[in-house]
Amino acid sequence: MNRKDPRVWIVGLALILIAGGLRARQASRGQQEEAVLSVLQSQQAQWNQGDVRAFMNGYWNSPELTFAGSNGFTRGWEPVRQRYEKTYADKAAMGTLAFSELEVRPLGPDAALVLGKWHLQRQAGDIGGIFTLVFRRFPEGWRIIHDHTTQSLPETK
């Protein structure tokens, strides 16, 4: 084949378009991960200020929101908020929250799965565990639509 052969130009153009698409997807994935992590950073800061209502802004405000924990399922934004307020009634019970080992896995352009660990440092004793969150992008931004959080058993020595 020579350079005047149209097949050479078509293949070259296809390679350029594929490379451009891959770069755009990688940039989009990076923006998606950054946006999701920003929600979690905000939640952590709001929790540490003792503001459960502001913390709840990271969740989808819908009756279809689900939370799975050791006591089963809680369905709906308002019941999830009430659960948090009952379990963590004051700043002492809330302690200081830290997320770690966060891993964002895109599930498409408008959805992501997040794996991570949580830890509460409190005077009454530290607790922590793991979580899996499903995020969805809405016009107002990324929100958690499902939260499965478990508390780890204390380590024995």
Image (cartoon, rainbow, N blue to C red):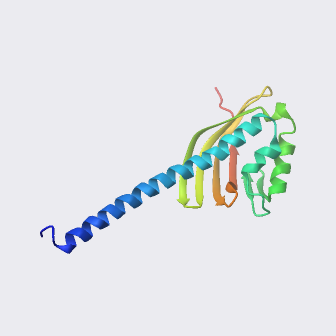
Q: Quadrant of the C terminus?
A: top right
Image coordinates for residue 152, horizontal then vertical, percent? 67, 39
* Above/below status of 86 relative to 120: below
Q: Quadrant of the N terminus?
A: bottom left
Q: Is residue 121 left or right of residue 109?
A: right
Report the number of numbered marks: 0
Residue 83 visible somewhere in the drawing? yes
Task: Tell me, yes or no, if residue 70 can be seen here.
Answer: no
In this orientation, which residue lies closer to the viewer: 136 or 155?
136
Residue 22, quarter of the rendered image: bottom left
Please name the residue shown 58% across and 42% down the image: 102
Q: Nearer the viewer, residue 122 or 43?
A: 43
User: Going by the image, does 51 lie left or right of 15?
Assistant: right
Q: Position of residue 62 (x, y in %)?
A: 78, 61
**Residue in view at x 55 percent, y 61 percent:** 109
Residue located 81% across and 40% down the image: 51
- Residue 147 coordinates in the image, percent (x, y): 69, 53
Q: Residue at x 65, y 31 (%)?
A: 155
Answer with the quarter of the image where residue 44 lies.
top right
Query: Which of the two residues, 58 or 89, is positioned nearer the viewer here?
Result: 58
Q: Where 16 sits versus 27, above or below?
A: below
Residue extending farthest left: 2
> Front-most of 66 and 15?
15
Extreme residue in the front direction: 4
Residue 153, quarter of picture = top right
Give coordinates of residue 34: x percent, y percent: 57, 46
